[in-house]
Amino acid sequence: MSIHLDNWLKRVDVDYYHMFILSWIPFNTWYVHNFYDETLRRTSDRNLIDFIKLNDNAYKSKIINLLSLNTPEATNFKTYIYELYHELENNSLPNDENRITFKKINLSKNATTSNPIPYNRKIYLFEYDESLPRTSKRFKCTIMKNNPANTTESMFELHSCKRSELEQHPEYLSKNHYVQWKLIEGFESINPKKPVNIVVSNAGIQIKSELYFVNNLDLISQVIIELIYQLRNKIFHGEVNPNNVFLKTYESAYKLHSQLIKSLN
């Protein structure tokens, strides 16, 4: 008789990467069946997820209800959010530059493409030109003097609104600390992927223990839907190294998501 102990031992632990993917299939089936619409150009996963975030539906309503209630089911749901929050904070997924977090997540395209900021008798004009190719420097800051009116002092351009790119630019490095903060503020204001933060210190909706979210159930539900979708993308696009470091992240995500999809029957 052959003994395959080693191979069976490898299967003792639950593969939550696999479980998370399996839990996405019924969700995908549900939203395509209910909301797919070629006439309205609601055909891609991104279009459909954005529609779910912004409109009433069973999935979104379940999130809001569980955040509002104090039942055992609601307590479990908030525990999964709490666990997922800490896993994402402790382990940058997929990396430090583009990490997924409740504190910084993009929900929709930023409508602000031009923003003049007055500071110290100058105007710092920040502009984003979407018509330019992605390979171009589409983000620009023009520094103008008030006297004579709107005289250009200097100008510099960036490929993106990433702080890492800004902080390496000679024009940024030549400025004092206060001007540097204005430059950061300005480029963040025109960032087409400007993030939102739903985590607050101690006033709002308590998730568990010291974790509080803003007192806006609709916004929280949008963030949770977007965050789960981004976690899905990192697996489907092969951006996650399926190791033990991120396994707990996907365990919490699976438990949270699987609780929601049960409302879709």
Image (spheres, grey):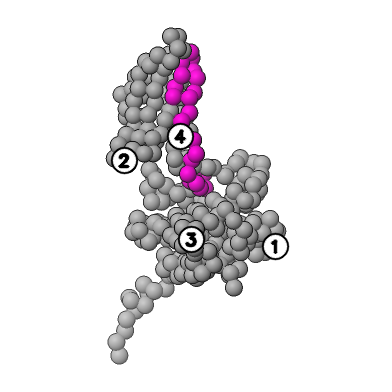
Q: Amino acid at mark 1?
A: Thr
Sooner in the amino-acid sequence: mark 3 or mark 1: 3
Q: Which residue is mark 2?
A: 133
Crowd tier of the residue under label 3, counting other residues whose Cα lies within 10 Å: few below 14, some 14–19, many 20 or above = few
Q: Residue at 43% across / 9% down in the picture?
A: 148
Report if residue 162 is visible in the image.
Answer: no
- On residue 113, which mark appears? 4
Nearer the camera: disc 4 or disc 3: 3
Q: Which residue is mark 3?
A: 39
Nearer the camera: disc 3 or disc 1: 3
Q: Amino acid at mark 4?
A: Thr
Q: Amino acid at mark 2?
A: Pro
Q: Which residue is mark 1?
A: 71
| Label 2 close to label 4 by CB (< 8 Å) | no
Nearer the camera: disc 2 or disc 3: 3
In this orientation, which residue lies closer to the viewer: 159 or 132?
A: 132
| Label 4 close to label 3 by CB (< 8 Å) | no
Q: What is the C-alpha distance between the residues marked 1 and 4?
A: 44 Å
